[in-house]
Image (cartoon, helix red, strand yellow):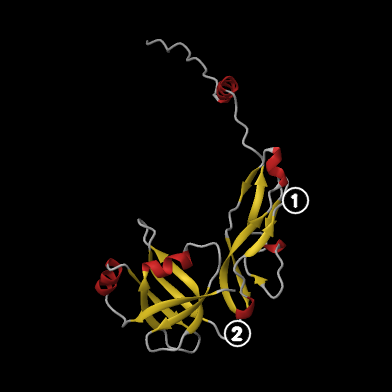
């Protein structure tokens, strides 16, 4: 897997106001952590982190912080601004040789589902899956062939199998499926169906006479 260098400035743990100032200057605060080690807080430019987040591949990152040895790591968590979609904070997890890691990787669909030619609609509810593997086995993405999917067929997390990689999602989690096309009811039929569904109105009887 390709390694991407991420240049960062070390920072001190600051107040909410300091973090706001960082973001106003188009910088993004982050935290690097690894088991049995003290976390390191840092910041990078929005321009540097953006291509590592908005991508269809997983990246192996070489984090270079001033005065420190470069660290191999992967993105573990990302926070976004709800309005602008800019990255507001992220966590990097340091890789240790021989130690398995859990992370999310993108799913890449291969081929064209057979059911689409019959009018089926392709749905891809799970774009990333949770995996566990050694650092050397981290894939850029997981390929899933959908060519044989017919209408009503689905591929679940339990159907996936890759060498040296364990899938952690629930076995019944739907990765991709082909569902039947939506049938539109003609206007006249729709009105008939509506009338048939309306309850019958029973007329009121004569009012009781007053004494």
Instruction: Tell me the tag on residue 87.
Output: none
Q: Residues within 10 Å of mark 2 (few under 14, many from 20)?
A: few
Q: Nearer the viewer, residue 2 or 100?
A: 2
Instruction: Tell me the tag on residue 148.
Output: 1
Residue appearing at x 71%, y 38% in the figure: 118
Q: Nearer the viewer, residue 187 or 146?
A: 146
Q: Quadrant of residue 208?
A: top left
Question: Can residue 151 be spotted in the picture?
Answer: no
Q: Secondary structure at mark 2?
A: loop
Q: Position of residue 14 (x, y in %)?
A: 28, 79
Residue appearing at x 56%, y 85% in the figure: 96
Q: Position of residue 38 (x, y in %)?
A: 42, 88
Q: Nearer the viewer, residue 195 or 58?
A: 58
Q: Quadrant of the C terminus?
A: top left
Q: Quadrant of residue 89?
A: bottom left
Q: Position of residue 162 (x, y in %)?
A: 70, 69
Q: Nearer the viewer, residue 171 or 97?
A: 97
From the viewer's perspective, is 168 left or right of 85? right
Q: Secondary structure at mark 1?
A: loop
Instruction: Tell me the tag on residue 99.
Output: 2
Q: How many numbered badges does the structure rendering display? A: 2
Which mark is in front, 2 or 1? 1
């Amino acid at each position: 897997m390709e390694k991407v260098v991420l240049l960062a400035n070390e920072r001190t743990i600051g107040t909410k106001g300091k973090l706001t100032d960082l973001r106003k200057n188009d910088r993004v605060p982050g935290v690097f952590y690894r088991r049995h080690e003290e976390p390191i807080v840092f910041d990078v430019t929005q321009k540097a982190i953006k291509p590592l987040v908005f991508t269809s591949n997983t990246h192996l990152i070489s984090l270079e912080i001033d005065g420190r040895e470069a660290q191999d790591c992967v993105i573990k968590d990302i926070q976004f601004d709800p309005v602008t979609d800019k990255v507001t904070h992220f966590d990097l997890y340091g890789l240790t040789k021989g130690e398995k890691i859990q992370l999310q990787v993108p799913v890449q669909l291969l081929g064209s589902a057979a059911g689409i030619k019959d009018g089926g609609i392709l749905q891809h509810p799970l774009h990333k899956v949770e995996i566990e593997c050694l650092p050397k086995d981290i894939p850029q993405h997981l390929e899933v062939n959908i060519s044989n999917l017919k209408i009503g067929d689905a591929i679940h997390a339990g159907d996936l199998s890759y060498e040296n990689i364990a899938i952690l999602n629930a076995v019944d989690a739907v990765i991709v499926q082909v569902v039947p096309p939506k049938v539109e009811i003609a206007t006249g039929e729709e009105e008939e169906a509506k009338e048939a569904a309306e309850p019958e109105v029973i007329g009121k009887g004569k009012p009781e006479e007053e004494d």
